[in-house]
Amino acid sequence: MTYVIGKPCVDVMDRACVEECPVDCIYEGARALYIHPDECVDCGACEPVCPVEAIYYEDDLPDEFEAYKDDNDAFFSETLPGRDEPLGSPGGAAKLGPVAADAPLVASLPPQQP
């Protein structure tokens, strides 16, 4: 089980969750943040600090954000535009830095109003 970041984060990316995460498992895409499902330790520290309430435990994900679970996984398991291979498990977001791409669902969304 893991936490998932949904649509309210798209084009907002407040990053309070990144600062709160004790294991550095929240990665930055071009338009959204993504929680690595294998690196997350399910501590829940990220959820209450999110100002747009975009983070959910995967079992509590609202139906309208269900597709974000697969999209979050795709960010790490699929080859993103501009990359030669999937991200896989880089071992920490700070080490990798921002990724200039997004998972397919987020990339397909029109710009979101803040």
Image: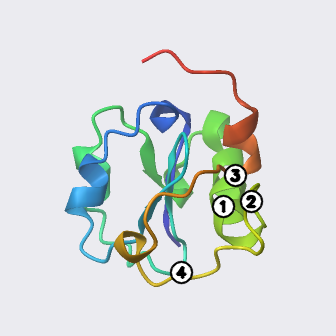
Do the residues under discs 3 and 2 have CB atoms within 8 angstroms?
A: yes
Label 3, label 1: how far apart the Cα atoms are: 5 Å
Q: Residue at x 72, y 62 (%)?
A: 74
Label 4, label 3: how far apart the Cα atoms are: 17 Å
Mark closer to the observer (1, 2): 2
Mark closer to the observer (4, 1): 1
Mark 4 and mark 3 lie on one chain; the one further toward the N terminus is 4
Mark closer to the observer (4, 3): 3
User: 36 and 107: which one is in front?
Assistant: 107
In terms of image quadrants, where is residue 99? bottom right
Q: Amino acid at mark 1?
A: Phe
- 110 lies above or below 29: above
**Label for residue 38?**
4
**Label for residue 80?**
2
Do the residues under discs 3 and 1 have CB atoms within 8 angstroms?
A: yes
Label 4, label 2: how far apart the Cα atoms are: 19 Å
Mark 1 and mark 2 lie on one chain; the one further toward the N terminus is 1
Q: Amino acid at mark 2?
A: Leu
- 89 lies above or below 7: below
Mark 4 and mark 1 lie on one chain; the one further toward the N terminus is 4
Residue identified by numbered label 1: 75
**In the image: residue 26, left or right of residue 81:** left
**In the image: residue 81, left or right of residue 110:** right
Mark 3 and mark 1 lie on one chain; the one further toward the N terminus is 1
**Label for residue 110?**
none
